[in-house]
């Protein structure tokens, strides 16, 4: 699953696992608002100072598409997340 997420330039999701998998492999993610309390509270676990270039929150699908377009305009530039994910989850085969 991580290999798959590592191939994307951006992920739009309304699921917490999509958010986590994306962040493990430094893929930017747009989190779409949902009724799932785990998702809305879980996104707050990622401090904006450290994850602000890789995690975005959208109130609706239109906003999610706009954010995805902004991310795609980076033309593949990768912003590395803090080393927590690399230490705990990263698989060297993805490099």
Image (cartoon, helix red, strand yellow):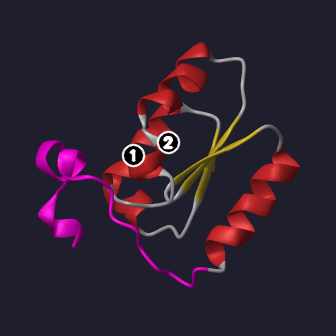
Q: In this view, does 38 lie to the left or right of 63?
A: left
Let me know if residue 1 appears in the view. no
Q: Give the range drawn in magenta.
A: 74-95
**Quadrant housing the C terminus:** bottom left
| SS label for mark 1 | helix
Q: Which residue lies most toward the bottom here?
A: 75
Q: Mark 2 points at which residue?
A: 18
Q: Which residue lies most toward the front here?
A: 49
Residue 1 is tagged as none
Q: How crowded is mark 1: few (under 14 residues within 10 Å), some or many (20 or more)?
A: many
In the rendered view, tell whether residue 7 sits above or below residue 19: below
In the rendered view, tell whether residue 71 sits above or below residue 19: below
Q: Name the residue under label 1.
A: 21
Q: Quadrant of residue 88?
A: top left
Residue 62, given in percent of the width and then of the height, sits at 87, 51
Q: Which residue does the image show at 13% across and 64% down from the upper left? A: 92
Q: Nearer the viewer, residue 28 or 4?
A: 28
| SS label for mark 2 | helix
* Residue 18 is covered by the magenta coloring: no
Asked if labels 1 and 2 touch by Cβ distance under 8 angstroms, the answer is: yes
* Residue 85 is covered by the magenta coloring: yes
């Amino acid at each position: 699953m991580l290999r798959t997420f590592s191939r994307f330039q951006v992920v739009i999701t309304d699921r917490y696992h999509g958010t986590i998998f994306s962040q493990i492999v430094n893929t930017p993610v747009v989190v779409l608002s949902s009724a799932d309390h785990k998702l809305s509270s879980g996104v707050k676990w990622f401090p904006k100072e450290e994850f602000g270039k890789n995690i975005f929150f959208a109130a609706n699908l239109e906003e999610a598409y706009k954010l995805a377009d902004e991310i795609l305009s980076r033309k593949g530039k990768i912003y590395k997340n803090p080393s927590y994910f690399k230490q705990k989850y990263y698989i060297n085969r993805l490099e």
